[in-house]
Structures are given as structure tokens and as C-alpha cells.
Image (spheres, rainbow, N blue to C red):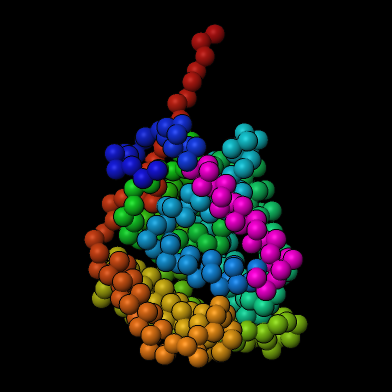
Amino acid sequence: MINKSFKPGTTLSAKSIRYWRTVQLIFFLIGLCILLCLIFLPELGIHLFWNILIPIAPLLLVVATGLWRNICPMGTTSLIPRHLNVSQRKSLDAEQLSKLNFIAIVGLFIIVPLRHAIFNTNGLATAILLSSLVFIAISVGLKYEWKSAWCSGLCPVHPVEKLYGLKNKLKLPNAHCKTCHKCITPCPDKTPGLHPLTNKKSFLNKLSGLLLVAAFPGFVWGWFQVKDYESILSPQILLDVYGLPFLGMLFTILFYIILKPYVRKDLLISLFSFLAIAFYYWYRIPALFGFGIFPGDGMLVNLTQFVPELVITSISTSLIIFLFWWIVLSKKSKISWLLRPAYEVKTSFLK
Ligand code: SF4
């Protein structure tokens, strides 16, 4: 599957396609099992989704964005209509793409705080959320070409891929798009060195990029200062779950604006990307093992009686040092998340 001789424009062999389809099927089934657990065994489903899959995801997005984009169960689901040849295969123009990208970021900022209000503790609510996203993903997959409208447009994880996937080092083929139809520009899969501010064609593009780079670190910090509730009924709870993340956003936007004239753009983006993920793991790893700010919230297993807190702090610190090296210090990436497939050959028929 990982072939050093792969170059942009390479067509996958039948054997490689079989490989990738098998892996995609396995992850699709894992996704389906998690969804069923969220409905029928909610406690297990919550652990599998919020306390295992989601904590691994940011690290995976940093070190292997393309791998994730090849195997993500939601992405695979969205592409089922295309693989079955029932998609209308429309292309998206720049304006449509910028609107979808903006909706994805707004969706991310709306959905994530609701984890504290309901999703973190309610398996059925999480299942309804995921099913709604699946419905949208399939609907846009039925209309638009390959990964344009969901994986590179509306998916709320896509903005985070752009922020964390700055330094790709893995050469992987595109295991979904069989041939490239140039359905979007820029295509995040085939653009080397992509970052959230790459696309500056419109005001919405710029706003989306700024919101993500500058606001996300503060949003992550603020999110971890809020405890889990089990209801969204009270306006006070909504104020609590959105208040600190939004305050954090304002703070880091201000910080970004102050630094912008003095720091090189690519370095500033790397620093803010690092800051966001560093906040995430600094708070998330202790919480997983019972050492969080709010004991019990987001806990996978309680190790407080068995392991000194220093061990957990050392693990978080080591991971954060590694991430600093990868995101900020390591060389700029010349490899796109995925290698471009061969362009589609347009056939014309002589009459
Ligand atoms: S690789 Fe080509 S076909 Fe696939 S999403 Fe990108 S532009 Fe579209």
C-alpha cells in the first residue's frame, strides 16, 4: 500500500485497490459497530467513540492525514454513491467550496461545546448526531464528484485536518478518487504544503482560515475548562458550555493579530496549530486516566490509585515535545496528503 515509487498521476494497481477496499471496509464496519454500541450499549459506545477514537484522531491527523482520509468511515460512506456510479458527479466552483468550508468551521464550533452539554454523556444523542452527519455526507455524495463536497467541504473534521496536517511525510495514493476530475481547486488531497490560509480567493476563505488558525487554540483551551452536563435544557448550561471556549477564541485571535506583523506566516500557522493540539493533549491525556480537572469527565480508565500523576504528566509532556518537533521544527512538507491520481482522460467520439 505504501510504495516509495508512487508519483503524482499514478494509477493504482488492481491489487492495491483490493487492499485499500479491504481496509476501508474494516474501518467502515468498526464505525458501524461504534454507532450500534452508542445506541444499544451507550456506555461502551461513549468509551469507544469519545474516549478512544476521538483522542487518537488529532495525532493521526498530524502524522498521517492522508491515511485518515483514505480510511475514515464517514468519508467512505459519503463516497458509496460515487463508487456505485450513482452520483451525479457535479463539480464545485470556488464560491460553493468556500461556503461549504465556512459552514464546516461554524459547525465545528457549534457542535464541539455541545459535547459538554449532552454528547459526552448520552450515547443515543451522539448516535443521532453521527447519523445526521452520515445523512448529509451521503446526500452531498449523491450530487457531487468524489471527495469535493463532504471530505473537502462540509465535514467538520476537515478544518482540523488542514490545521494539523501541515507537515505530511507519508507518500500514500488516493484510495478513493480513481482518476482526478479536477472537481475542486485547491484540492486538499493533492496540494503540497496545504494550510488553512492557502486559499485566499474570497472573504469567506480568509475568514475561515483566520477563524481556524487564530481561534482554535483558545477554543480548545476554553473547552477543557468546562465540565460535563447531562442536559441542554437550561440556558445557563448553554452559556457555560459556549462561554469559555468563545472567550478563549477571542483571546487567541487577539494574540494572533498582535504577533502577525512580527512572525513569518508559515511559522505563525505552525505555532498556532501546535498550540491547539498541545492544549488538547495536555488536558485530554490526564482526563482519560482519571487525573483531569473534573475527575470522571471523559475518563477511559481510572488509574489514580495505581499510577503516580507524574507518569501521566511525563507522557503528555513527551507527546507535546514530539508534536512541537513535528509541527513547528521539522522541514516544510513538499508531499501532499495523498498523491494525485491520473487525470481523467476525456474521450471524444467521431461521428
Ligand atoms: S483528487 Fe481530483 S477528483 Fe479527487 S477530490 Fe481532488 S480534485 Fe477531485
Question: In the rendered image of this protein, does residue 234 appear above or below residue 119?
Answer: below
**Residue 257, position as x, y percentages in the image:** 37, 77
Q: Could you tell me which residue is drawn at 25 percent across and 76 percent down?
A: 262
Q: Which residue lies furthest to the front in this view?
A: 306
In the rendered view, would you say 237 is above or below 177?
Answer: below
Residue 311 figure quarter: bottom left
Magenta-colored stretch includes residue 32: yes
Left or right: 272 in relation to 96? left
Q: Please check the rendered image and state whether residue 286 is part of the magenta-colored stretch, yes or no.
A: no
Question: Magenta residues, as a range?
Answer: 20-44
Image coordinates of residue 124 in percent, x first then y, are 73, 69
In the picture, measured across the screen, residue 135 lies left or right of residue 11, that is right
Give the answer, above or below, for where 144 lies relative to 133.
above
**Quadrant, the N terminus:** top left
User: Residue at image x 60%, y 77%?
Assistant: 113
Q: Residue 114: horizontal and vertical position, in percent?
A: 64, 76
User: With respect to residue 148, does 288 lie above or below?
Assistant: below
Looking at the rendered image, the quarter that the C terminus falls into is: top right
